[in-house]
Image: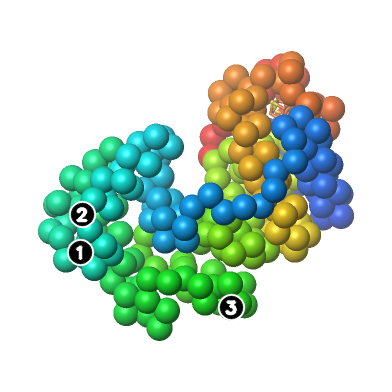
Amino acid sequence: MTAESVLNVARPDVERAELLVWLKDTLRAEYGERGLDSRREPMHELISTILSQRTTHADEEAAYQELRELGDWDAIIAAPTEQVAHAIRRSQYPESKAPRIQQTLVALRDSPGGYSLEFLRDMPVKDALKFLTDLPGVGIKTASLVLLFNYARPVFPVDTHVHRVTTRVGAIPKMGEQAAHRALLKLLPADPPFLYELHVNLLRHGQRVCSWTAPKCGVCVLRERCDAYATYGGKVPSWKA
Ligand code: SF4
């Protein structure tokens, strides 16, 4: 067992929840208030998030645009899978993503709502998460992004940056990304604007300061309450998910 893996294990939940509120307020002071508005249509968000896995934002957008040039969703289902893979080649692992995207589109086409995801707006959160994660290629992070960003539902997407920063600071003990979704959601208020702002500011902080390797603790606004910094000082080890 590494020293990192035993950080914060004994911290009570009430303390973790308070730390998350402090994180949100501190990051707001640093990066500003972020209003909850959906950046893309729900179907765009859903398919793009599948494309985004291990892919830069620019490549994800390029892959999505070229995918849509194949036609409407029915046309993408009907296209040869190799043609779909070619269209999304700017995304990583196009050969495995192409059939998953086609299978997801088939499942949506055959569902009561078709390609409209509007019914997710009023469905109980648990059922909405289940509907989305039952789709091929859709995991808890993608489902949470669609529900929070597009329908302002109280869920919390945990990407690699959110996972790394919340763990290093000590809001949750070291665990996998899937488990971190459940652990963080249990500690956070069911308040979509709060959840959205915390998500986007943690992501920004992870990209700019609390990087995977050699985090910039010397300029970090979270340093005074960061368990990793308290434990390792200026030598916080590289992140191992
Ligand atoms: S003090 Fe260092 S390890 Fe802690 S959150 Fe800031 S950059 Fe990350």
Q: Is residue 123 above or below residue 66?
A: below
Rendered-image quarter of ligand 1: top right
According to the picture, the residue beneath numbered tag 3 turns out to be: 123
According to the picture, the residue beneath numbered tag 2 turns out to be: 70
Residue placed furthest toward the bottom: 112
Residue 105 image position (x, y, % from top left):
31, 67
Q: Which badge, 2 or 3, comes first in the chain's sequence?
A: 2
Q: Is residue 17 above or below residue 135?
A: above
Quadrant of the image containing the N terminus = top right
Residue at 24% x, 68% y is: 74
Q: How many marks?
A: 3
Residue type at mark 1: give it. Answer: Ala
According to the picture, the residue beneath numbered tag 1 turns out to be: 75
Name the one closer to the observer, 112 or 53: 112
Question: Quick check: marks 2 and 3 in contact, CB under 8 Å?
Answer: no
Q: Which badge, 3 or 1, comes first in the chain's sequence?
A: 1
The part of the image, by quadrant, that contains residue 8 is: top right
In the visual, does 203 lie left or right of 58? Answer: right
